[in-house]
């Protein structure tokens, strides 16, 4: 997570109305959950959904062990304790598509940072997004960066009449639930299509980094040579 992405999380969480509900899909070590808990009103319910199963832990960490998952689980709770927000965050240790019955009611802020495959990303955006309130917000991490996530956005959001693309902080995209007119839908499509050039650069950077060509990858990201975030 970058500083700008943390600021976006803070802004959106602080805008959730009193008594509202936040759902985070994919908590890993808890940094984003801490931001959400500190930013939101004390009456806002915060649900962090992550099975901590050892797989889909991050870039190039798709396959893992149960021991790694348990370590992530312990680090997650230690992070909440250290930040003084353990009593503010309800952890649902389930895969996101098995967790619907564990979270009641509508959602004011949905933060999707789950599995990056096309199928799981489709399910998270579609099924959890359906539960966002008419004026609520959905944040999607690894937008225009992870191939599966971006394909899910193309399928579900580029021509949507229900989601307005607000913008992004690097690979964290912000959408607002809205009822779009035909003209607004066209503008929305254009705004998201413009991001595909950045997506292509990100894919190229990843290919170069995996191939061990970090010096070449630096030419595409201002000299950093880092995995896109």
Image: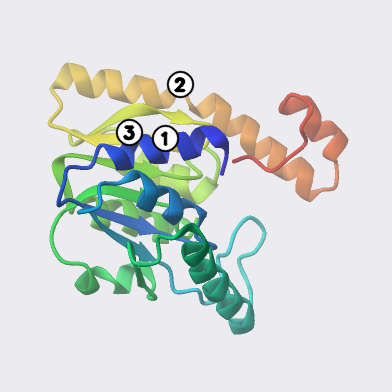
For mark 3, what is the residue? 158
In primary-sequence order, the first of circles 2 and 1 is: 1
The quadrant in which residue 39 appears is top left
Labelled disc at residue 194: 2
The reply to whether residue 113 is visible in this rendering is no
The quadrant in which residue 59 appears is bottom right
In primary-sequence order, the first of circles 3 and 2 is: 3
Q: Label 1: how many residues lie within 10 Å, few (<14), some (14-19) or many (20+)?
A: some
For mark 1, what is the residue? 8
Which residue occupies the foreground of this view, 18 or 125? 18
Residue 210: % across, % down: 77, 50
Looking at the picture, does residue 225 appear above or below residue 23? above
Residue 115: % across, % down: 48, 60
* Residue projecting furthest to the bottom: 66
Residue drawn at x 60%, y 66% is 62
Looking at the picture, does residue 181 appear above or below residue 56? above
Looking at the picture, does residue 65 appear above or below residue 72? below
The answer to whether residue 38 is left or right of residue 196 is: left
Q: Label 2: how many residues lie within 10 Å, few (<14), some (14-19) or many (20+)?
A: few
Q: Label 3: how many residues lie within 10 Å, few (<14), some (14-19) or many (20+)?
A: many
């Amino acid at each position: 997570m970058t500083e700008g992405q943390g600021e976006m999380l803070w802004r959106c969480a602080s805008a959730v109305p009193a008594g509202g509900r936040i759902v985070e899909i994919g908590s890993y070590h808890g940094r984003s959950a801490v931001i959400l808990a500190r930013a939101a009103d004390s009456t806002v319910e915060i649900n962090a959904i992550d099975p901590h199963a050892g797989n889909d832990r991050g870039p190039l960490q798709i396959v893992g062990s149960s021991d790694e998952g348990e370590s992530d689980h312990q680090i997650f709770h230690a992070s909440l304790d250290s930040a003084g927000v353990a009593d503010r965050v309800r952890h649902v240790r389930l895969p996101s598509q098995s967790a619907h019955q564990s979270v009641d009611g509508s959602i004011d802020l949905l933060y999707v940072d789950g599995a990056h495959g096309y199928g799981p990303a489709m399910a998270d955006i579609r099924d959890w997004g359906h539960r966002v309130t008419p004026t609520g917000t959905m944040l999607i991490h690894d937008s225009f960066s992870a191939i599966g996530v971006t394909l899910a956005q193309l399928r579900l959001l580029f021509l949507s009449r229900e989601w307005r693309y607000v913008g992004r902080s690097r690979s964290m995209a912000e959408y607002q639930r809205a009822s779009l007119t035909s003209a607004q839908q066209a503008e929305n499509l254009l705004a998201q299509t413009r991001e595909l050039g950045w997506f292509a650069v990100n894919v190229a950077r990843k290919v170069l980094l995996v191939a061990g060509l970090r010096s070449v990858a630096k030419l595409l990201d201002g000299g950093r040579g880092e995995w896109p975030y």
